[in-house]
Structures are given as C-alpha cells and as structure tokens.
Image (spheres, rainbow, N blue to C red):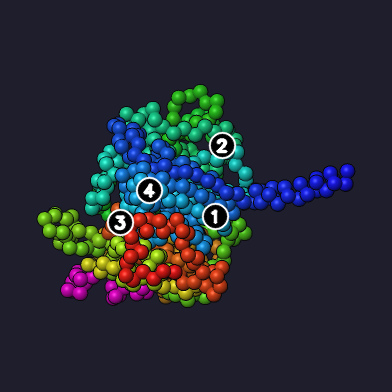
C-alpha cells in the first residue's frame, strides 16, 4: 500500500508542473502555406498570393507568455517574409521578418520557421508580408489574450469579433510596384466588398448580435496605402486599446486607423432590433491627391430576432476630413493602472528632430515620371532616402561586423532649418534639398537609452499623413499638432502622465508628433512609413540597439536554420564575412 501511495504522490508531482505551465504558457504552432489562389471578392476572378488559401489569412490566437512557432512554406512565385507587426521580439530580433533587414527573403519552393515568445503585451496585432506590395493579400490577425485567469481591464464581452479592413485591386500584384501605385478598385471588410458593388451585393460580412450584449471588436487596418474611417450606424464604440496597449475608455461614434494600426472597441448592442450598416470610408490627408470612385465598403450588424429588412446607414465624414481624424488620434490616453503599462521616462539621452515626407530623384532614362520637374518621387527622412541592402541583411552585417552594408551616421536633425510646412524653392540649396541622398542609413543607440523623436511633417512636395511604424518597441505619444513644432510653445503641452502608447502613429499632414521610447531591445529595427507605396520611395531608416551589459541583454546568434538560405546562396564566401 505504501508503495502505491508513493506512486500516486509521485504521479501527482509530475503532473502538477506540467498543468501549471500550461495554465500560464503554451506552445502555439501553425503552418502557413503561401501559394497563388483564385479569388473573386469583386466582379472578376483574380489570382492572388494567399496564406492557406484565404483572404484575409488565418487568425493566430495566443495568450500573453506563449511561444509561437509558424512554419512558412513558400509555394508562391514571389520572395516572401512574414512580419509580426507590433510584437516586441524581445531577444528574438532575428524573427522580426523584415526583408534584408533581419533576414533574407524566403525564396519560392523554400521554407522558414519563425519561433518567438509573446511577452509583455495583450490585445490585437496582425501579421503581414514584408516584401513590397505582398501584404495587400498576405495578412491576418494576431490576437494576444491575457494569461489564463487574468481578466480584461474592462467589462467581459459576450463575444469577440475580428474586423479586418482591406484594399483591393483588380490587377496582378506586380502592377502595384508602379510609382505611384495605381488607385485601388475597392475596399473590403473581412475579405468582402459588400453592396457597394452590384456584383458583390450578396457578399457582405454580417455580425449577428444579441440585444443588450457587449461585443469586443478587434479592428485592423490591413490596407496597403489607405487611412480609413470606421463607423456603425446609430451605435457608439468604447475604445479600450490601441495597437495592443490598453487605454482609458474613450467613447466615440467614429474610429480612424492608419495602415498598420489596430483598435479594440466595445460595441453595446443597445438599439432596437434591426440591421445597421458597419462601414469603412477612405480618409485622404493630402491636398489634391486623387482617390478612387468607390471609397467605402459595407458590412452589417444584424440583431438576432430582427424582422425588418431595412438597414440604417451611418452619416460619414468627408474623405478629406482631417479634423475628425485628428480629433480621434489625439484624444485617447493610456490606462496607467492597466497591465503592461510603462511610465514615461523623464530623462532623455537621445533627442532627434526628424523631418519627413516626399522628395525627388532623377527619372530613369526613357521614362516619363510624374514628379515635380519631371522627376520621380522619393522619400525623405532628414534628407536621407533609404536604400535596401542587396548583399547581407543589416542585422547579420551588424552581428558579424561585415563592412560596407550600411552607414551608422543617420543624423539627429535635417541638414538645414527651414519653414517645414511652407516650403518654397527660392535658392539653389533649397532645390537640392528636394533630392535626398540614397543611403542604407542607421542610428546607433546605447542599450537602455531613452530616445525622444520629434517627427516633423513637411510640405516639400505635398503635406500628407504618414503612418510611422517602429519595429521592436511601443512608444509613448507625448503630443501632436499642426504647423511647425516650436519647443518654446509645445513642450509645455506634452503629456508625461498618461499618454497613449502605440507602435504606429499617423503624423498629421503639415504637422508634428513627439514620441519617446526606451531602447532596451538589442538588434536592428526598422522605422518607416507604413504606406506600402512609400517603401520603395525610401521613407525608412533603422535603429541599431547595442547589447546590454549581460548575456541576457545581448542579441543571441541567429538560429542555425536562419542561415540555410545564406549557405545555399554561398554568401558565406564573401571575403568580409567573419564567422561568429
């Protein structure tokens, strides 16, 4: 009997740690098969690259603390990487999924496995391809729920619903590489165009709700290039998170999302039984910018038990309503008492003033270019236009001390001061300012340093909102406004108590934003405009965060399978390669 009791005790002791670990962290595993697929969300069939044959792609559900493993099998004709937008990638920067920044692209008929831990964040993020234009159809939701037993910091919803806003073209994906990119043919909600088009009238997403219940809407702007309004007829939304960071509840009847942003909002089904349009509407921030004829897509919120066939339509803002967009983006504050909140660091080690917008570069011979003076458009950050590396990914070059891949001299300010929001070419020097220098340019940051960036939008070509996305970090949004940033006037207005935190922020057209973050994540991290059309323009730079004082705060070597593509390409034979 004693031996049997010992067996029972030992059996329970073996089980307990396993059960406990499962309660707090698990391994979540997926396979992403990237291949061409024939879709018809609009009026004609179109061959598009997809993940697992769906648009949008599969939803990845994890809990905070879980380890995510995703096997990407590339059976498409395109080079591919998958970026986990907004995931910190703490000590796993090799898994960030940025083409020629952290990895070589996954070539056709090749495969790659992403493996990383999801720690210190909860809410809605998303994954998408990070090779130009492919994220138009290669994208999906990444939902991070609290650890088991930990409640949301808001009333528990009756149900949750994903709302993925997308942009659609009736053309081959290669045609989106044109500069400028062609206008889109439609907008989609969860892959469906709705009744904005006769041919898709019966293809409309419907959210069925029970009167009196609350629903958590996880809204993602997966559009390639478009800022979007979002509204539900006769209903208010209570915003509770932005970019997977909890906020103080903010009640609004309209939401605005730049490309790459996410919003978690509670919908209270408190109206009479019926059907209500859920609509996304294009927001155009640039004066005189062309936009498509069809600027909205419809879905439906349908009350269970409704008998009427009538549908209430929301009143929508004008597509150029910058004030409504600014009111939403600037009004929300952070939930200081919420999980994973980080106070604003007060001592700043690096101060950067970064002008941003469009410039020009020489038009290639035998081409007609649409830019000013007959040139083609280029991007500009402090008069630098980013050139993607062609030999080694930046992080590999940094880790192995390979020279000649990038420069580490990205400037803290533009070469000259000027009237940023009222630029006029009156001198030869100002004319030359229109032509930013093409470089693969990085800024070196000491580990654990606090960085403040003033992003100043310019009107050198046109003033428009640029959604700037920082990989590897969230940042505090301390303030934003219109016109030129003036420290003597604007520093006193900055919110150092409970600002919102984000990974992507739209810089107001002809305006500015002040960001602050702590560089506590070693590796190479892109900072770029999240309008895909602006990636080849070069509105990009990179931060290189140096190692900390201990192995636990230092970038580890890349996983062995990370290097397989390099061995195949014989890149290790490069004379400057220094084996780790």
Which residue is label 3 attached to?
A: 534
Between 295 and 348, the one nearer to me in the picture: 348
> Relative to residue 374, is residue 453 drawn left or right?
right
Q: In this figure, which residue is indicated by the disc labeled 1?
A: 118
Measure how far apart labels 1 and 3 are at the Cα level. Answer: 29 Å
Badge nearest the viewer, 2 or 4:
4
* Secondary structure predominantly adopted by residues drawn in magenta: loop
First in sequence, mark 4 or 3: give its number: 4
Q: CA distance from mark 2 to mark 1?
A: 35 Å
Q: What kind of element bears circle 1?
A: loop
Front label number (1 vs 3): 1
Q: Give the label, 1 or 4, closer to the camera.
A: 4
Label 4's element?
strand
Label at residue 270 = 2
Given residues 76 and 513, the one toward you in this image is 76
As drawn, the residue found furthest toward the top would be 307
Q: Earlier in the sequence, mark 1 or mark 3?
A: 1
The image shows residue 531 at horizontal and vertical percentages of: 34, 54
x, y (%) of residue 68? 53, 50
């Amino acid at each position: 009997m004693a031996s049997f009791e010992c067996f029972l005790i030992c059996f329970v002791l073996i089980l307990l740690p396993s059960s406990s670990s499962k309660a707090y962290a698990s391994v979540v595993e997926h396979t992403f098969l990237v291949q061409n697929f024939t879709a018809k969300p609009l009026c004609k069939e179109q061959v598009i690259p997809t993940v697992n044959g769906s648009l949008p792609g599969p939803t990845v559900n994890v809990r905070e603390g879980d380890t995510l493993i995703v096997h990407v099998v590339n059976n498409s004709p395109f080079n591919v990487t998958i970026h986990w937008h907004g995931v910190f990638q703490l000590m796993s920067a090799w898994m960030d999924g940025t083409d020629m920044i952290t990895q070589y692209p996954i070539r056709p008929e090749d495969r790659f496995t992403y493996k990383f831990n999801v720690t210190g964040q909860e809410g809605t993020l998303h994954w998408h391809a990070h090779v130009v234009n492919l994220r138009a159809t290669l994208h999906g939701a990444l939902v991070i729920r609290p650890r088991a037993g930990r409640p949301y910091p808001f009333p528990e919803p009756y149900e949750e619903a994903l709302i993925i806003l997308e942009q659609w073209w009736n053309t081959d994906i290669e045609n989106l590489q044109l500069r400028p990119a062609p206008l889109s043919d439609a907008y989609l909600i969860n892959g469906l165009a709705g009744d904005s088009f006769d041919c898709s009238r019966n293809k409309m997403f419907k959210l069925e709700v029970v009167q009196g219940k609350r629903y958590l809407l996880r809204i993602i702007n997966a559009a390639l290039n478009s800022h979007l309004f979002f509204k539900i007829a006769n209903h208010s939304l209570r915003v509770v998170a932005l970019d997977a960071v909890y906020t103080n509840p903010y009640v609004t009847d309209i939401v605005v999302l730049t490309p790459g942003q996410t919003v978690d909002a509670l919908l209270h089904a408190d109206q009479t039984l019926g059907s209500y349009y859920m609509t996304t509407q294009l927001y155009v921030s640039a004066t005189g910018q062309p936009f498509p004829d069809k600027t909205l897509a419809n879905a439906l919120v349908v009350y269970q038990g409704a008998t009427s066939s009538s549908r209430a339509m929301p009143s929508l803002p004008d597509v150029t309503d910058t004030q409504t967009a600014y009111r939403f983006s600037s009004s929300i504050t952070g939930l200081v008492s919420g999980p994973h909140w980080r106070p604003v660091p007060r001592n700043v080690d690096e101060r950067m003033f970064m002008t941003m917008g469009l410039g020009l570069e020489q038009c290639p011979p035998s081409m007609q270019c649409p830019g000013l003076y007959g040139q083609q458009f280029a991007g500009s950050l402090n008069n630098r236009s980013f050139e993607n590396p062609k030999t080694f990914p930046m992080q590999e070059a940094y880790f192995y001390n390979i020279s000649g891949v990038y420069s580490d001299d990205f400037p803290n300010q533009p070469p000259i001061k000027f009237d940023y929001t009222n630029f006029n070419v009156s001198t030869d020097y100002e004319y030359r300012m229109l032509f930013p220098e093409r470089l693969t340019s990085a800024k070196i940051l000491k580990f654990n340093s606090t960085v403040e960036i003033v992003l100043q939008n310019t009107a050198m070509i046109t003033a428009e909102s640029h959604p700037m996305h920082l990989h590897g970090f969230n940042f505090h949004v301390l303030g934003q406004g219109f016109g030129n940033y003036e420290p003597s006037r604007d520093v006193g207005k900055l919110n150092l108590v409970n600002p919102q935190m984000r990974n992507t922020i739209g810089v107001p057209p002809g305006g500015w934003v002040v960001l602050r973050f702590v560089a506590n994540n070693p590796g190479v991290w892109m900072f770029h405009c999240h309008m895909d059309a602006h990636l080849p323009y070069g509105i990009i730079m990179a931060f290189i965060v140096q190692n900390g004082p201990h192995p636990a705060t230092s970038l580890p070597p890349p996983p062995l399978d990370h290097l397989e593509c390099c061995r195949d390409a014989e890149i290790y034979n490069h004379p400057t390669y220094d084996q780790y």
